[in-house]
Image (cartoon, rainbow, N blue to C red):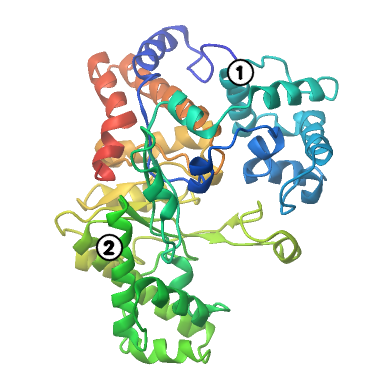
Amino acid sequence: MREDRLLPADPGTRAVARRLYEAVRDLPIISPHGHVDPGMLLEDAPFTDPTALFITPDHYVTRLLHAGGIGLDRLGVGEGPLTERASRDAWRLLCENWRLLRGTPVRYWLETEFEDIFGITERPSAANADVLYDLIADRRARPRELLARFGIDFLATTDDPADDLAPHAALAGAVRTRIAPTFRPDAYLEPARPGWAGRIERLAAAAGTDIADYKGYLAALENRRRHFIAHGAVSADHSHADARAEPVDNPDRLFQRALTGDITEAEGTAFRRHMMLEMARMSSEDGLVMTLHPGIHRNHHPATFERYGADTGHDIPTTVEFTRALAPLLARHGTDPGFHLVLFTVDATVYSREIAPLAGFYPSVYAGVPWWFLDNPAAIRHFQESVTEIAGFSRLSGFIDDTRALCSIPARHDMSRRLDAGYLAGLVRTHRLDEDEALDTLTALVTDQPRKVFKL
């Protein structure tokens, strides 16, 4: 890996970017939105299976290999613990098909992880697949060891509202990193989905109450939010088909119909849009940061979903609209003291048209950085130009890694720091910023901004 990777090609701009990057490269990592399993951190079992470490938990990797004609079953997806032979076979498939990752950030992240963690500098191939497998397996790295080595100060997980959060309670004080749950209520806000009444029973049991009506339902959600806050949560995360928030006249009627299963898809959508207003109200009252990332067609391929389940690489972006969709929510809470709303998107067309103008007016709104399909160098550079020109750097969320793969966290943050250093160096070279201002801005983006936005 070359030291100047991702920095600008122009020698003068690169020199400035190098100085900026060197000043922040070793600053602590703040990770306020991710999907690392807290149970894995609690168990702290050594990583002896490179496939389970780098392939099966990372749908960024598996979807690219699947697109190249490799079945997900051959990669261990949905198969449970693999035998060593099955694990080696999956690892060989990655190494033999390394060319499929060319030009993607996935290759960049994996190369960074291989070199920085395991000292691997060879390009993976069919010839060295077994050697690389053994090198990683013999290292027997433990999750908590990596957590400390990576310099992660704060790590948020994503959790069901009915979870007891026992792993978080056990980890508190056991590791230097502050590990916090994130309240993710999506499944409890979509009453037309199959199994919704059963989920409400589970919510009631977790809250220790009966849920007979809409008022009891709201009380149970508020109860669970308090439970999460008591275990260190700082945010509530929401992802639905759209960003719309609008009231309905009689939510209790829709709630009662949902309990009996007698609710249409349209009524379920109306109820969920109403509940986004309630979620904003709760965030305004209890202080949990509200993060919103709509516009994903979940489980696009039915056969893959039936065979392997959700989060296996076939969620596909759609277009999304924020300005009109969020008008009722922001009319009620957009200027509430302490209310924070972070807007993410996988539709890059809305950065300058909607997200930046909203963040450039409402003190509660922050522009979430490029996420998921957009967390690549080209999209990040587009975001830098699209948002900061309109809203400024102070309205950005700070970097979000959004990953299940623990080892990819530092690689992703390092990529962001390099790209931000390059962009700010360009502003210095075109005499729009002094270098001391650029350094102050970069430092804020790395540490101060995420702490401010997520109330750390």
For the point 47% across and 49% down, the residue is 349
Q: Position of residue 82 (x, y in %)?
A: 76, 44
Location of residue 325 with respect to 421 vertically, above or below:
below
SS for tag 1? helix
Q: Is residue 210 left or right of residue 405?
A: left
Q: Is residue 114 left or right of residue 99?
A: left
Q: Quadrant of residue 456?
A: top left
Q: Which mark is residue 408?
A: none
Please, what is the three-letter code of the amino acid marked with disc 1?
A: Glu
Please, what is the three-letter code of the amino acid marked with disc 2?
A: Arg
Q: Which residue is mark 1?
A: 115
SS for tag 2? helix
Q: Which residue is mark 2?
A: 226
Question: Can the viewer see residue 255?
Answer: yes
Q: Quadrant of residue 394?
A: top left
Label 2, label 1: how many angstroms apart (C-alpha)? 42 Å
Q: Position of residue 285 (x, y in %)?
A: 19, 64
For the point 64% across and 36% down, the residue is 53
Location of residue 425 with respect to 393 vertically, above or below:
above
For the point 22% across and 61% down, the residue is 286
Question: Can the viewer see residue 246?
Answer: no
Camera-side residue of 418 and 303 = 303
